[in-house]
Image (cartoon, rainbow, N blue to C red):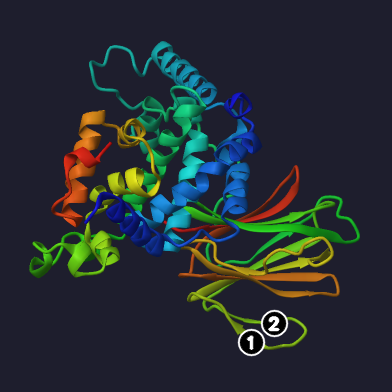
Amino acid sequence: MPRDDFRRELNDAFSRISGNPSSDLHARVRSAIVDAPERRGPVWLAGVAAVAIAALIVGALFVVGPLRGHGPTIPVAGPSPTPSASAIATPSPTPSPTSSLPAFVCATSSSLNGTQPPQTAFVDAVRGGVNTGYDRFVIEFKNGEPATVQVVPQNNATFTQGASGQTVQLQGSAGLLITIHGADGHTQYSGPTDFHVGSGILEARQVQDFEGVVQWALGLSQPACYRAFWLTGPDRLVIDVQTS
Amino acid sequence: MQRAAQGDADAFATLIQPLLDPAYRLAAVMLGDRTAAEDAVQEGSIKAWRKLGQLRGDERSLRSWFLSIVANECRMARRQRWWSVLRTAEPRPDQAGADPALSSDLKDAVLRLPADDRLPLILFFYLDLPVDEVARTLGVSEAAARSRIYRSAKKLRPDFQAEEVS
């Protein structure tokens, strides 16, 4: 086969395999980068800070006594050794960027109250992202946090469409229902209302948007722990669903 | 680039935007799964953002650096989907000696190649990268990159010549 033919046919095969990326890939990647918790500052600065803190702790332990004159092994102060003692001796090079985030909760409902909520908080973006260990679902508000948000887990992916009362079946075997009071999902937002996020959140779909109540349903691959919290600048409701 | 290096996430997102399509095409062929490919591109983008301080060189180095991160994401994704590796690792014995381009669908032949054999072909033929950039993406010398392209292409077209890698 001539060289050019091989290249053309091979590229045709590649094209048939890959197709084109979905239209929201660029927006999805951008939002994932902007929402990445690690964006708070240069990594090297965090590394330097961690090393300095570790040095101070080790120095303090040495002065106080536990690390003095015990040979090459690091002893644990006190009569009952604990795992935390060895964690001090070998600190992580960088502090956990997610340390300020709330803990994941499992099989329990969550409730969030907005700070100084407007009469109606207008949704102006909804997106999902895949991160190491969790999938992230984000609802962004144009003019402030809504009054209240409830997140209710369920052990199936069947939800009720608001207004019509029709049953909707999302992908997955478990779900989360996010109910936002004091919100409007249609005036400022015209993006997708049903999309795939990742291996944990198989489907996100808006199931209600009327009378000041917006509901989004998440279809999960399995019952999973999650955390719900606010981020600001812009105001965002964030739901992280654990994937590992 | 400077703004991104100073921690401006929007600037970084803008910087890599032209690279997302080639990264997706690379991932889609590596994984043979379009949804998983988009996940790999997204995860690779986040990792690139976190590792931006490790980038050596300027914007000209960005493409090969970014593609190498996405390729690594694909390898990790394949390890997690070990069954797919088993499914596509080697050509079936009855087809191993045939010329796939002539005797069967080239697409299937590509999918039967191990992912690490696909990668140099994707970079050289599909993304049309010059050999030196293929080498940087693979993390090998130019000579080794030429050799890998040649060996992989020969599995698809047995009469492929080394001189065709130029």
Residues tagged 1 and 2 counted as in contact (Cβ below 8 A): yes
Snapshot quadrant of residue A165:
bottom right
Which residue is tagged 2?
A161
Which element type, helix, strand or loop, lies under badge 1?
strand
Q: Residue under mark 1: which chain is it in? A: A
Residue A191 is situated, as x and y percent measured from the top left of the image, at 71, 63
Of all residues shown, which one is farthest toward the right? A119
Q: Residue B124, image x and y in percent?
A: 33, 43
Work out whether residue B31 can be spotted.
Answer: no
Q: Is residue A167 left or right of residue A78?
A: right
Instruction: Please give the chain letter of the residue carrying mark 2.
Output: A
What is the three-letter code of the residue carrying label 2?
Answer: Gln
Q: Residue at x 31, y 56 (%)?
A: A10
From the viewer's perspective, tell me whether residue A238 is left or right of residue A180: left
What's the residue at 50%, 50% (across, down)? Answer: B21
Residue B140 shown left or right of residue A45 in the figure = left
* Camera-side residue of A193 and B142: B142
Q: Residue, x 78% and y 60% (percent of image)? A: A123
- Whether callout 1 and callout 2 share a subunit is answered yes
